[in-house]
């Protein structure tokens, strides 16, 4: 078994190599819109889950997941020619939902702040008393 540091380094090298390999193996006009966002590599280097995003609608996302998983053998073959390890991991490609989730949370927080600012309407929290205790006396 490899150390955590070695697993991290090899995973990063695989990620970099995949960026170069994908346009050669996948013949799709939108392949350049694919970004590898992460790679989970097993400690024995036998299995890897490749997380990616793609600019486009849900149909394109599903198309890319199917295409990448279908071409996994060819991608793995190309990776074996570049990677200097004894084994090349069996890869599974998964669409990374975290980017869309983060964007959705950012939008919700932005809307919340906007609604909060719109709700103030110039009211600074003194209930219109102008600092006079509400008794009509301006002397305090």
Image (cartoon, rainbow, N blue to C red):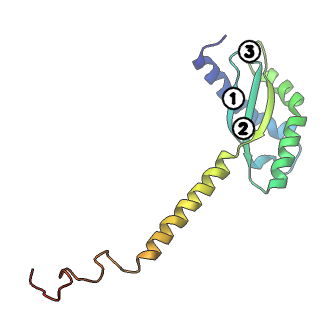
Residue 133 image offset from top left, x and y in percent: 18, 80
State the residue at coordinates (77%, 18%).
46
Label 2: state its secondary structure: strand
Horizontally, residue 8 falls left or right of residue 110, namely right
Q: Is residue 30 visible?
A: no
Name the residue at 82% across, 41% down.
Answer: 23
Number of the label disc, if any, that sits on residue 85: 3
- The residue depicted at 67 percent of the width and 10 percent of the height is 1
Which of label 3 and label 1 is nearer to you? 1
Q: How far from the left and from the top, in percent, is residue 71?
A: 89, 34
Tags 1 and 2 in contact by the CB under 8 Å rule? yes
Question: Is there any visible trace of residue 80 in the rendered image?
Answer: yes
Real-space CA distance between mark 3 and mark 1, rounded to the nearest whole angstrom: 16 Å
Q: How far apart are the two marked residues, 1 and 2, measured between alpha carbons? A: 8 Å
Residue 78: where, in percent of width, then height?
Answer: 83, 27
Q: Nearer the viewer, mark 3 or mark 2?
A: 2
Q: For the residue carrying disc 3, how many other residues have a C-alpha within 10 Å: few (<14), some (14-19), or many (20+)?
A: few
Q: Which one is in front, 110 or 71?
A: 110
The disc at residue 51 is 2
Q: Secondary structure at mark 3?
A: loop
> Which quadrant would residue 5 be assigned to in this image?
top right
Q: Residues within 10 Å of mark 2 (few under 14, many from 20)?
A: many
Q: Which residue is mark 1?
A: 40
The C terminus lies in which quarter of the figure? bottom left
Image-based side of 116 in relation to 66, left or right: left
Residue farthest along the bottom direction in this orientation? 136
- Total marks placed: 3
Q: How many C-alpha atoms fall within 10 Å of the one at disc 1: few (<14), some, or many (≥20)?
A: some
């Amino acid at each position: 078994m490899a150390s955590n540091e070695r697993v991290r380094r090899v995973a990063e090298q695989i990620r970099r190599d995949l960026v170069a390999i994908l346009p050669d193996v996948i013949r799709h006009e939108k392949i350049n819109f694919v970004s590898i966002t992460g790679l989970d590599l097993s400690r024995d280097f036998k299995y890897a889950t490749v997380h990616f995003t793609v600019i486009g609608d849900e149909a394109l996302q599903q198309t890319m997941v199917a295409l990448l998983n279908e071409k996994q053998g060819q991608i793995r073959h190309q990776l074996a020619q570049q990677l200097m390890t004894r084994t090349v991991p069996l890869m599974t490609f998964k669409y990374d939902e975290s980017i869309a989730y983060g964007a959705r949370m950012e939008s919700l927080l932005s809307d919340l702040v906007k609604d909060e600012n719109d709700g103030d309407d110039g009211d600074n929290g003194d209930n219109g008393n102008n600092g006079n205790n509400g008794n009509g006396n301006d002397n305090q």
